Amino acid sequence: MSLVAPCFDLGRNLGQRLTVRPSRACKPSSSPVSRSFASFSPGSSSRWLRSWPIRRMAVNGTHAVNGVNGTRSKHDISALKVNQSRLMDAIHSGCKYGAAHRYGDDPVETGMARLSLNDADKEVRDWFMGVTASLNCKTTIDQMGNMFAVRPGKNPKAPPIMMGSHLDTQPTGGRYDGILGVNSGLEVLRVLHENNVETEGSIGVVNWTNEEGARFPMMAVSSGVWAEAVSLETAWNLPEVSPGDDGHRKTMKQELERIGYLGSQPASYKAFPIAAHFEVHIEQGPILEAEKRRVGVVKGVQAFKWFEITVKGRDTHAGTTPFTARMDSMLCAAKLIVESNAIAKKLGGLATTGILNQQPGSINTMAHTVTFTLDIRHTEDAKLAEIEETCRSEFARIAEKESEKGCKVEWKELVDSPAVNFHADCVAAVEASAKEVCEDLPMTADDGQLWKYMISGAGHDSCYTNRRCPTSMIFTVTKDGISHNPKEYCSPEDCAIGAQVLLGAVLRYDKLRAERGDLA
């Protein structure tokens, strides 16, 4: 990052303690600490990884003396503050598109039903294009509809640091899953823009297509194509889960074309290389809230696999077919689902069935075919493989031995996401920023630490970006651990904390790139 006239001598590594020597022009403030991110005073010079003057800030990220466009020190990172009110306005403005499932009287007390590539997704994409244009970003769209908005830095030819997440939601989703991550990135760009900050390298925001996998049943498929872990043809030909009003299931390519977001840029890390990827996300679980912490420094993601299981039997009359003569695919499927949960629990993992369909669909006729999804997870690849292997053998046994005249079971793998370990430099940047932000928050945790290392239980686009560039994530508190639900909630303060940690992490990594010669 390049601003004006340094005030400090700087340490070189993300993880080392710095000796801070302010110039005469940089006098510590004696003002009390404010809890607001719009008015925040850094603390003593003994803090970790401080590379900025100790000066009191006024509202909206502006300097109390010099104003938005005033002179700044070269590494005046802490003088840059996200605007909590503006961040929340942006989140809720974008949520006008696809709002659904009202649960309260307040205008923002709704969930979301913005499935990937539907009409509401087109509208929020148009909104994203407008916001990034106002920030002087160049936005490109690839063949999967991934949107890359880049704010040029001093070295615009080098791959940018990207802050990424997604704007698509579950059918009964909330206002924060993915949405917070994209808007946190946009807020970081706003802060840089309004303060005329010239970063060393370019910095941008990416909106990944169909992260949820709710409409097109392959989670994070578009970041997977970018990482060349999923073929473009496989993704383009992926049909939606449920048919439309015309009775036909549209493919991803058809819907990308329909809404005007089938880009010409190849969907590949080779066509659009990324220097590093940072993602803010709600935790989607109860741990941070239960432990009274504020930030999760995410070191990795547990392994998971998705399958579509097909059980084939025979459709016969419910009243005239004795049990001994039945090939009841529905009963067999029910037993398999129960067994998958027992196996996962025994081996310390998780198993979930979220979709179940059957044919022909008559009250007094046994189903001849049942399909259901199976999502299995574990923090260790070897244990996940054991869960899968055990399920396969037990499913075959149940179908043959415990289904009267027997059924047949077929497996189709939809997603294979091995356990992920994020890059040490990105994790260190997030950790350093989290420490700095948390030092000025009221202490609530019993052990005196408001941040913690975490392993994500959910998959994210960061799982795929990690294959091609250094990556890490930042978790924020999720009320009651509820997600994929209209009442999903992250408080305005916790949203701002996540965005502030993101700002600090990205600028630290930008500085690190320059110091080690990545931009030469």
Image (tube, rainbow, N blue to C red):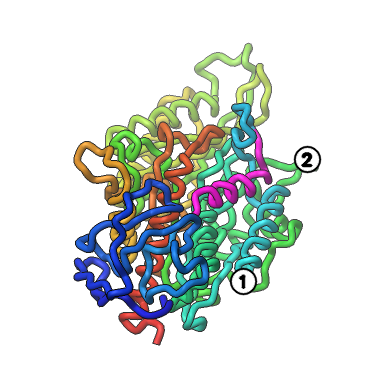
- Name the one closer to the observer, 402 or 223: 223
Q: Residues within 10 Å of mark 2 (few under 14, many from 20)?
A: few
Report the side of 367 relative to 9 (left or right): right
Which percent across, then down, holds residue 300? 33, 54
Name the kind of residue labelled 1 in the image.
Asn
Report the side of 300 relative to 255 (left or right): left
Q: Quadrant of residue 470?
A: bottom left
Query: Does residue 504 lie above or below 112 as drawn?
Result: below
Identify the residue at horizontal 41%, vertical 35% (top origin).
481
- Name the one closer to the observer, 230 or 125: 125
Q: Is 95 inside the magenta-drawn segment?
A: yes
Distance CA(mark 2)–CA(mark 1): 40 Å
**Disc marking residue 211:** none
Q: Is 306 inside the magenta-drawn segment?
A: no
Identify the residue at horizontal 56%, vertical 36% (top origin).
371
Which percent across, then down, holds residue 452? 27, 48
Looking at the rendered image, the quarter that the C terminus falls into is bottom left
Which percent across, then down, holds residue 194? 54, 66
**Disc marking residue 136:** 1
Name the kind of residue labelled 2 in the image.
Asp
Provide the residue designation for mark 2: 245
Report the side of 397 relative to 330 (left or right): left
Report the side of 479 relative to 19 (left or right): right
Under circle 1, the secondary element is loop
Query: Given the current orientation, which residue lies at the most extreme right position?
Result: 246
| Magenta region | 83-100
Under circle 2, the secondary element is loop
- Name the one closer to the observer, 6 or 458: 6
